[in-house]
Amino acid sequence: MSAPRINSPARPGQSRAPVVDILHLCLSPPFTPGSYNRMVGVQMKRLSGLRQAVASYWDGPVPDCSLDPQCIILGGPADLPAWKRVIFRLPERFRARFFHGVADPCRLAWLALIGRVLPRLRPRLVVCYDDYKIGPLLRPMVHWPCRLIFSQHGLSYYSAQPYTARLYTLASFDVICTLTYASYRADRDRLGSYEPLVAVIPNGIDTARFKPVSLAEKRALRAKWGLPLDKQIVLSLGRLVPKKGAHVVAGSWPHILAKAPDAFLWIVGAGEPSYHRYLQQLAGSDRMGDSVRFQGSVDSSLSHECFQASDVYVFPSLWVEGMPLSLLEAMACGLATVASDLIVTRELFTGKEAHFVPDPNIQHSFVAPMLQLLGHPQARADMGRLGRQTVCENYSEELWLARLENLYRSQLELVPPSQP
């Protein structure tokens, strides 16, 4: 049996536990694709005045990059003693029953190995990212002054009440950090009780990276991505799963082409293969011609170019959203946007930064607002300027980091300092 690895890619093989004030528990490490882990990496780089570490699960090679403070890489079930591995032979329903709904073997192994690492690090704050069921399992592992924070990124988890009731108690977490007031109210109203302190901290966007570009730069980006230079590009960027609603736009595309023949739909993202095939069947209609392209997945380091190369962004989500980052990114790039009217968007925006569609499932509900923007360049420009102004004033990365640092420092004041 091997011990949990404490690796820093900049200093491979180092085994001495770092001095940690804040330990982030994020299943995927910061160097892998994803929103939560990417945001943890930003915190570790930008909040340099706080001693931080992240504990993640990863079974592949660690890239040659520098993380400071350390990235703690924990193994999987094979790193557990044999008597604990017996648990993974149980049917999934029994694992879920014994471990408060946590049944995934990798997640259970990660949690067990965290239990071995925590006493070595003795952090003053532990921040959990969206692994909402581990609170009741995590609290018994901590036997020193420590505050537990849950960073909630969904609007609500809609779990069975026994699970959710255990989550929103001081027996699990001291603080729940939500993105919007809507996220907090969605569960509070359903449960009738909510014991932990609640901090509302919206996401932040790097407005220096996600920014408008000149017409010459836009044309250069279109050439780079092989997009038509003489078309109006409508971008849909996100996971290709039904709840994200790309089929709503694709199904209505012939009606848009009938009145805006120079429109071009650029669908960026990957997801469920069966849904992708469904979308391709819709786009294969003779009425659409060659006006639709499926780009597939794009590296997150290049996603800003997709917005900057486009004219209109469409966000047809059919499901609840915690706080849609792509919508903020599109606005930061100065794109006019047509978006589903969700409970969180009503909280985040005045209603003038985008055309908000109240009933996205209704057939052709996106057609009229998209045609309005495609036919009026000045209206697009005005909406894009207002959207960027809103993001810069309220949802920039600098504001997000400042709010997080204030939360962390206020919580650190409640526990004695760690000793080097």
Image (tube, rainbow, N blue to C red):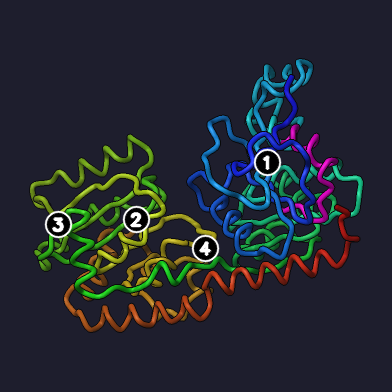
Spatial separation of the CA atoms under disc 1 and disc 4? 28 Å
Secondary structure under tag 3 reads helix
Say which of 337 and 309 sits in front.
Answer: 309
SS of the residue under disc 1: strand
Image mark for residue 254: 3
Q: Which mark is residue 72?
A: 1
Query: What type of secondary structure mainly makes up the magenta span?
Result: helix
Residue 327 image point, x, y percent: 41, 65
Q: Amino acid at mark 3?
A: Pro
How many C-alpha atoms fall within 10 Å of the one at disc 3: few (<14), some, or many (≥20)?
many
Q: Mark 2: which secondary structure?
A: strand
**Tag 4 and tag 3, C-beta contact below 8 Å:** no
Quadrant for residue 91, please give it.
Answer: top right
| Residue position for label 2 | 237
Give the side of residue 349 with respect to residue 196, left or right. Answer: left
The alpha-carbon separation of the residues under discs 1 and 3 comes to: 51 Å
Segment tinted magenta in the rendering: 111-127
Indicate which disc residue 323 carries: 4
Residue at (17%, 53%) from the top-left corner? 226
Please say if the residues under marks 3 and 2 sit with CB atoms less than 8 Å apart: no
